[in-house]
Structures are given as structure tokens and as C-alpha cells.
Image (tube, rainbow, N blue to C red):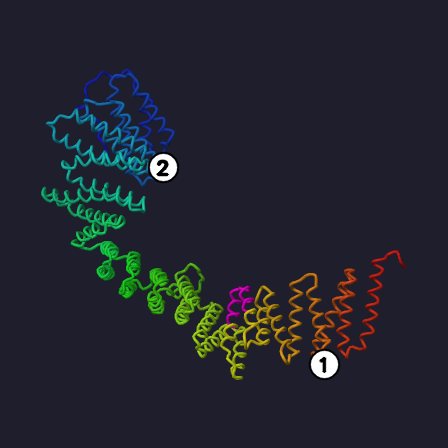
Amino acid sequence: MMIQELTPDMVEPVEAPTSVPNEFERLVEELEQGPSSFGLDKVDALSSAALAFSSSSDAGKTTEMWKLSYRIWNACVDISNRKELTTAEKEKNAKLRNIAADVLLAAGESSAVHSSLLKIAMFFQRTGCLWIQLNRFETAEACLAKATELCTKAKDVIKDDDPAIQHELTVLSFDVHVARAKASWEVNQTALASNILGRALLLLPQLPEKAVDLADMYLQFGKAVLNASSGSEGAVNATSYFEKAFEICSDGIVSLQFEGKMACKKAMADLRDRTLRYLAGAHVQCGRYEDALKCTSILKSGFPLHPSVPFLELKALSALGKHDAAEEELSKLTDGDTAKVDIVGAAIEIITASGSSSSVPAAKTAFFNTLNKFPSCGKFSRQFLTILVQQGASRLACVEAAIEVGQDHRVVASLLSKTKSLGVLVHDDSSDQHSVHALFWNCGSEQFSRKNYTMSVKLFETSLLYLEDDRQEQRAKALRVICLCHMGLLQYDRASECIQLAEEIDPCIASVFLKIMSKCKAEGQDTSGTFFQLLMFDVKGRQKDCKGQQEIIERCRAMPGFKAEHFFQMGLHSARDCADSTVASAAFSAGLHMMMTSKSPDYRVVAAMYRKLISLADIQTKDGVQVYDLYMEAHQLLIGLPAESYPRDELHWLISTAWNRAPILARFRRFEEAEKWMKLAMKLAERAPSMESSRLMMSDAVAEVELMKNQESNPMEE
């Protein structure tokens, strides 16, 4: 607001000053002419010049200082009105206004200005409010403290017979108190802030139209206390501020109506209702549920009903054990059109947690009512399903409700709508769709560990609804786990269907296991236990759980009906897919032991297992000792076998691979090891009649290696 300069008729005739404030006035003129180029350095220079002039002894300087102060203030108003200021420009503007106020304070009262003390106080009050807007609360508090002192001094000076000036002083004092309370609160002087608000409250009977400002400040203080502490102690402290705000609003509505000032009545009523909602929330937080219900009963008489009102009443009723009434409030909350999704979600969580027999149906009804209004809100669907599943840890009814909700086409659509509408597949492990898939899968795994296979099947099948279309390997894995559940329920036909479907999606060892199972079943054998273990082995492999696979192998050694062929297929599967080759070695070793202890070993399978074990040992060891031991085992086996019992091609493979290791070792002058392998190959060749003609050549080669070995150990001998 522009402030008019002193008019000539208001100025007392004074003797012309002996010196003119040249520097001070020059800077003021520069500010008026080019405010955009008036930098912070010039602001500091202006402050110094003002201080120097105020300390001078020039006659008539008081009037001159008032004029220059007004010119600074009006220049600041011009700057603010021309354009939107940046934060830095606003701070510079506030500093200039502060200088104008300080100049007036230094000049003191002027007989040329009516109520000059009020004018000075007004400068400090408005400057303090600007500092508050800039969050410079300490500077603001200093300005407003000066304004308070000036108002107190003015009260003693102003005559009682001037009601207009008295009213102006009362209004200014009130505004100063409210603004100073805000600044003091922000610098953590909460006791002082409360005390200052109390001073403003004493002035309220004279200024009923100011009730909104004061009540709002009490409300802001209460909210600050409530937000600063999540415990009941903070809520108790906050209620005192809320109650004072409510009292001011209630009294204000009556006084405004009585005085005919209806323009402020609606604003006052709105503020009262808002205060009551916070008061009800504070009562709930500190456990005063009956008091909270008193607040909500008043609020329910108004229109329109704020959505937080039924929520707060629901929370209080639920805490008091009045579940039927709480569920009725939930219904009211979702029937309206103003409730936000997050409020409904919080209300549903409270009702579900209450544990009453009708809580889950009531929560489902409220959920679908809200989902119909917000059909694409996947976050809300995920939140509700999470609530049900978490409650399901102790209540299976909640899990069953989660399955029913999760399979509903509206819920599926709300969670898949984003990826479908985009027309592309974007894998986001933090998405609501992925979260719901993981939610059902993990819950299904928990029920599986409890051997509740019926519930597990439903949960796993529901999780598949939220699996991306291109994650076929994961889908196949899920189908195999579902197959395990059907096996546990002795539902073999359903288990076969799952495996066949998994095989169509992602071919793997499952098809081999299925063929083995079919063959054994045709022979009249009970294959359920065997197939269950084989499938578990496959699942563990896909989970990269090599330790779990080895435990299954050890368990299967003693299982009736488990055959060497099963171990052989397990070994083949592990050798191909598992990063840890020890699993495959364990499977082949178990199969080899089982085959060799049987009444009629199949030596073609035995030979294949030896070949696989040797290949794996080559990978696992660097010194070749384990590999050599396997060749020696094969040789010991051959000694006790009739001729031609061991497959000829496999025997030739043993001989050739053992012999071919020697040249490599000899090249590195490891003649002793080379000789050992060559002699082993010769022993193996003795079991192969077709290699009789080659044994003489092999003997000559061994003799040559022995000679090189001797020369290496005795270099001086010729």
C-alpha cells in the first residue's frame, strides 16, 4: 500500500536545515529512478547513510527523515507492483522496507503526522509480515517486537476521546500479536507464542471480525504439535489449541450474527468444522474415543459431510468394540462421492483388523463400491489385497477373501490396465501388478509349507493371473509347483495336466519324468512318491538350490521304487542346467551305486554314468586324482566281468581318453604321471580283444617314456 508523503500544511514551520543529507537523499533518488539496478551493496550503503543522517544534529531532520522514509517505502511498493519478484528480489525489498521502518524509529514522533507512533508501528508490522513470508522468522520476530513496544507506548499517548484512533490501535495491536506469535513459534519459542496469542484473545471482544484470524492461528499451532509427535502426549497438547480455536469460532459465530456481520459467518463456520475434525482426530490419537464421537456428532449435523468425519467415527467406534456401527460408517463413507481412495483404504484396514464375523464381507463391499468409481486404481487393489493377506496369517477367511477378490475380473483389469493400454511389456518389479503376483505367490508358499495344498493351489493359480505374458519360464515353474500341490492331494490327473501344460510352455526334464512315471504306472507300481521327489528336484534346480537338490538325492537313495534310471535323468538335467556340477556328480554316483548293486546291471547305463562322472571330475578338479580313481574303478569293474559284457565303444573311449592324457603330460615333462596313465590305458586294453595288435606299440611307447623319465632324473648318465 502506498503511503502519502507529508503535505505542506501538515508540516510545522521549522528553520531550514544547515546541511542537506546529500548522500542519503541521493541514494533514495537513485532507488526511485532505477530500482532494478539498485543492488545489495547500495542497500547496505543506504542503511549506512540513513544511520549517519539520523545521528547528525541538523535542525528539522525529523521531518526530512519521515519524508525520505516514505519515499523508500513507496519505491518498494512500486517495485512489488511492477512484476513478480524472485526470492532474492523479495529479500532485497524487505531489507529496504526495514530501512524505512528503522529511519522512522530513529526520527521518532513527528507533530506533523497524526498518530505518528502508530505509523512507525505499522511499518514494522508490515515488514515483519514480509520476513515471515520469506521464512526469516528471527528477523520478523525482531521487527514485530519493536512494533509491540510502539503499540504499548501509543496506548499511553492516544487520548480516550478519539475512538477512530483507538480502534486503529486495537486492530494494529491485534495484527502485531498474531504475526509475532507465528514468528515466535517458528523459532521454537512456543511458550512466548502462546502467551502472545493470549494477548490477542483479550482484544477479540472489540474485534469480533478478527476471530477467524485468531482461531486459524490456534488451529495451526495445534496441527504443528500434532504433527511433531505421533504419540498420545502430543495429541493431548494439541487438543488444548484445537479446543481454544473451536471456542473462538463458536463464540464468533454468535457475535457476528448478533451484530449483523453475516459476511464472515460462513468462513467462521467452515473453520469451526475444520477445527472439530482435527480435534476429533487428536482425541482418537490419545485414546479419548467418546470425546471424538461427540465431535463427529456435531459435524454430522452439517452439510456437506466431509469424508474424514465417517472415517474418524469409524475409527473411534471400532476402538470401542462397536463393530456393527463402525461397518455402517464404512458403508456411508464409500456410498458418497467425496471420499478419497487412501481414506477408504485406511478405513477398510481398520474394519478388517477388527476381527468381527462380518468385517471381511463389509470390507469387500466397500472395496468394490470404491473400485467401481476408480476402475483403474491398481494401487488401491494392491493395498486391499495386501491387507487381506496380512490378516490371513491368523485368519484363513481373509486369505479366501483375497483369492476371491484377486480372481475378480475388475481387480485384474485395474492391475493390468497400464501395461495393456501402453501396448508394450515393461518389466517393473515395483509395479502393483508384480507386487500382487509376489503377494499371492509368497502366501501360497507359506500355505504349502503348512501342507495346506488346497489353499496353495488357489493362491498359486491366482498369482498366475498377474504374471506378465512373456515370462513363460516363470509360468512353467509355477505350474510345476501347482503340480506338487495336486500330488500332495493325490490328484494325479490334475498333476499330469499341469506338467503337460508346463512342458508345452517350457520343455524340460518334466517330460522325461512324466514318461518314467507312465512306464512305472503301466507296470503296476505306485509312482506318486517318486514323481513328487523328481518334480521337487526340478523345482529346486530352477531355484538354484543345489544344497536342496543334494538332500533330495540322499533321500531318494532309500526310497522304494526309486531306480538308477531316475538318478541318471537327474544327473543329465543337473549337468545341463545347474551351475554347481557337484549335484550332477552326486546323482550319477547314486545311480551308479544303485545299478551296480542290482541283480542285473545294465552296463550300457553304467558306462554312460562313468563317462559323465569322468567329464564332471575333469571340470571339478585340477590335479586329475579324482579322474584317475574313476578310471581305476572302471578297470576293477572290467576285471570281474565276462568278455563283451561292457559296451565295446565305451571301453574304447576309456582306453583312448586315458592314453591321450599322457602326451600332454609328457610335453610338460611330467613323465611319471604320463607313464601312470599309459600303463592304465594298457591295463584297460587287455580287456579289449580287438586291441591286441595295439598293445605292442603301446609297450614301446611306455618304454620310451620310462627312458625320458630316467634321463630327467639322472642327467649325467649317457
**Residue stretch rendered in magenta on the structure:** 534-552
Q: Amino acid at mark 2?
A: Ala
Residue 644: assigned label: 1
Identify whether 365 is placed above or below 268: below
Check if residue 314 falls in the magenta segment. Answer: no
Which residue matches tag 2?
88
x and y percent of residue 297 in the render?
18, 53
Chain-order first, disc 2 or disc 1: 2
Find residue 716 and report its image quarter. Answer: bottom right
Q: Is residue 182 left or right of residue 659?
A: left
Q: Residue at x 27, y 65 (%)?
A: 357
Identify whether 50 is placed above or below 546: above
x and y percent of residue 663 in the render?
77, 65
The answer, for residue 369, to whether it is visible in the render is: no
Query: Which is closer to the viewer, label 2 or label 1?
Result: 1
Q: Main secondary structure of the magenta part?
A: helix
Check if residue 540 falls in the magenta segment. Answer: yes
In the rendered view of the protein, which quadrant contains the N terminus? Answer: top left
Q: Amino acid at mark 1?
A: Glu
